[in-house]
Amino acid sequence: MKYLHLIWAALFRSKTRTLLTLLSVTAAFFLFGMLDSVRVAFNSGGDVTGANRMVVASRLSITQMLPYSLSPQIASIGGVKRSSYAAWFGGIYQDPKNFFPNFSVGPGYLDLYPEFKLPDAQRKAWEADRQGAIVGESLAKKFGWKVGDTIPLQATIFPTKGSNDWTYKLDGIFRIDDEKRKGQEQMLLFHWNYFDEANDYVKGRVGWYIIQLDNAGSADRVAKAIDALSANSDHETKTQTEEAFNQSFAKQIGDIGLIVTAIMGAVFFTLLLLTGNTMAQAVRERIPELAVLKTIGFSNRSVLGLVLGEAVLLVVIGGLLGLLLAPIAMTAATKMSGGFIQLPSNLPPESWITGLVLMLAFGVLAGALPALRAMRLNIVDALAGR
């Protein structure tokens, strides 16, 4: 620490070069903070212990539908308080870019989601309307829908009477008060009975079951009992937390961890070259000064430490700025998307630990060769300009 003033002075000897390098390091760790937070979020969850609401889906794939006949069997298992079911529809409104989740749901679905605030009159109207639909408040505002409107969707998977045209009457608009769950206002729900009767090919099949437990402590036992119902059949199930089930949708695009690692690998490789070049140039410009330091008594080890400290300090300052800015950007992205994109509001501890380790590692790697050159510097040759 006694040489910190020397390291600081050397670091900002060329302010423009240092600031540009700092911006590069900040940008790299800003991206790291955002992407690694997403990776941690996607890889967390999955343990059913302590869960109150769980989802029963196909063990093979979320695209594999399950028989409706499982419904009464699941409802009869001890510990299950309520149950319902749903099926992904995948309809498009006017244009593929207007994507939003839309799926059919069974009776009692809203009882499982008390956070969906739907006026009683609108709920009664929807439950009595075979072709009725309800949407979230955010989605209704986005397209200017109001109760009583007719909503046409183009099917991408399930045709009806040889056509892809499906129409629904908007019977209700629900809201969600929890800002963290506002993304669920971007969905449309309609009746599974209508879907089952009207679609041309799939009959008596649901996408997944949702269950609510009497006691969260019995989650593991109930999950095993449900999965045992279809063991060794062509429709084996996997009971998991709602969070893990939602993550599985996004994971269909690929291995999130691998994608993040590949992107950050390319970013940090470029950063290493850039920072290493900056440090090499800084040492070349200061060869006479380093020779003077050795002349007045600085040991080879001290000179090595000065250059390495400069490289580490450069990366740590930029890295900390990037990690501090990442949560601000993630919160802003969540708000701007109306909650449809849900990013963590804070960096998880795993990301902070990994980020700090990377800062130290890249600082040492970037400064290693210039520091070794400075340590091996011959005083006579350096002062003579050779």
Image (cartoon, rainbow, N blue to C red):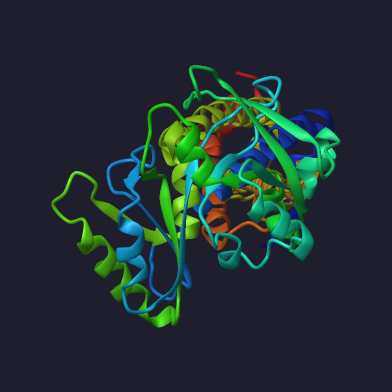
Q: Which residue is drawn at 68% across and 26% down?
A: 93
Where is 258 relative to 313, above or below? above
Quarter placement of the N terminus: bottom right
Q: In this view, does 291 lie to the left or right of 44?
A: right
Quarter placement of the C terminus: top right
Q: Is residue 53 left or right of residue 305?
A: left
Image position, residue 106 (x, y; %): 51, 54
Question: Extreme left residue here?
Answer: 232
Where is 328 relative to 266, above or below? below
Where is 184 relative to 379, above or below? below
Total marks placed: 0
Q: Which residue is drawn at 72% across and 39% down?
A: 169
Q: Is residue 194 or residue 237 the one in the foreground?
A: 194
Q: Is residue 110 or residue 349 the one in the foreground?
A: 110
Q: Which residue is drawn at 56% across and 30% down?
A: 267
Q: In this view, does 67 lie to the left or right of 179?
A: left
Image position, residue 134 (x, y; %): 70, 48
Asked whether the viewer can see residue 7, the reply is no
Image position, residue 325 (x, y; %): 75, 48
Which quadrant of the structure image shows residue 32? top right
Asked whether the viewer can see residue 287, the reply is yes
Image position, residue 87 (x, y; %): 47, 43
Q: Is residue 279 or residue 70 the one in the foreground?
A: 70
Q: Residue at x 80, y 36 (%)?
A: 149
